[in-house]
Amino acid sequence: MRGITDTVKHLIIINALFFVATSLYGDQMYQWFSLWFPKNENFGLWQILSHMFMHGGFMHILFNMYALFAFGSPLERMWGRNKFLFFYFSAGIGAALIHTGVNYYYFNEGMQVLMDSGMAKGQIMEIVSNGRYSPDWYNLASKNTIDNFLSAYSTPAVGASGAIYGVLVAFGMSYPNSELFLMFIPVPVKAKYFIPVLIGLDLFSGVTGYSIFGDGIAHFAHVGGALFGFIMMWYWKKNQFNNKRWN
């Protein structure tokens, strides 16, 4: 395996510094730099970028940074620094937009149910903005609808996973026959098979709410990063993108 490239190394260092700072100033860091729902008072536009450097725990950052090293370095060697950075951050921003769009759907769905029951919008917002809810709400709609409504408003998104999924797609399209050795699969699997299956599992989990990887995962952010990564790769390939413009 060839060594780590400069840009990937610097991204990993920045992520590590954010992780250390979060360990020291957890609540404040999460409040400032996580990606909150736009109607939440903690939301700031900078969070569309800053959330990509935040992580929820050691295993979270470990897996993301290993994937960035393993799959990002070959892409940086192929593309160069500027094109890689453009791709990486575009995929991450795309993931944030898809994640936020899905949260808007969940939030509006729950809000409409509660308003149809006779509650005023301002009353509902006052309750959820204080981190509260009424158990009676679960009598008005399915548990999934209310849970998604509350989570959309009050649960921030963190992690580089959206950008990483874009990188995975780019790697799979650039090196489709590369064999990946995975600790939970005893035989090597070609990238062109493994990566679509991984994305498919995230899409399944996002739609059904059932996750084989555990709770608290922003599945639609993963799918969004993969989608934006695919769109960029498709566009660049179709238009025979001129690499000199990135120098």
Image: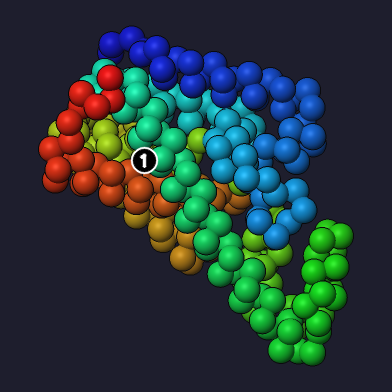
Q: Image point 41% across, 52% down: which residue?
A: 223
Q: Is residue 143 visible?
A: no
Q: Is residue 183 above or below residue 193?
A: above
| Between 117 and 1, the one nearer to me in the picture | 117
Q: Is residue 231 above or below residue 30?
A: below
By what rule are the colours in the image chosen?
rainbow
Q: Which residue is mark 1?
A: 166
Q: Which quarter of the rendering shows the C terminus?
A: top left
Q: Residue 97: image x %, image y %?
A: 50, 53
Does residue 91 appear to the left or right of 193 in the view shown?
right
Q: Image point 34% across, 51% down: which residue?
A: 227
User: Residue 38: which quarter of the image?
Assistant: bottom right
Q: Image point 72% across, 27% down: which residue?
A: 22
Q: Residue 47: image x %, image y %?
A: 62, 41
Helix, strand or loop status at disc 1: helix
Q: Is residue 193 above or below residue 175?
A: below
Does residue 241 appear to the left or right of 132 in the view shown?
left
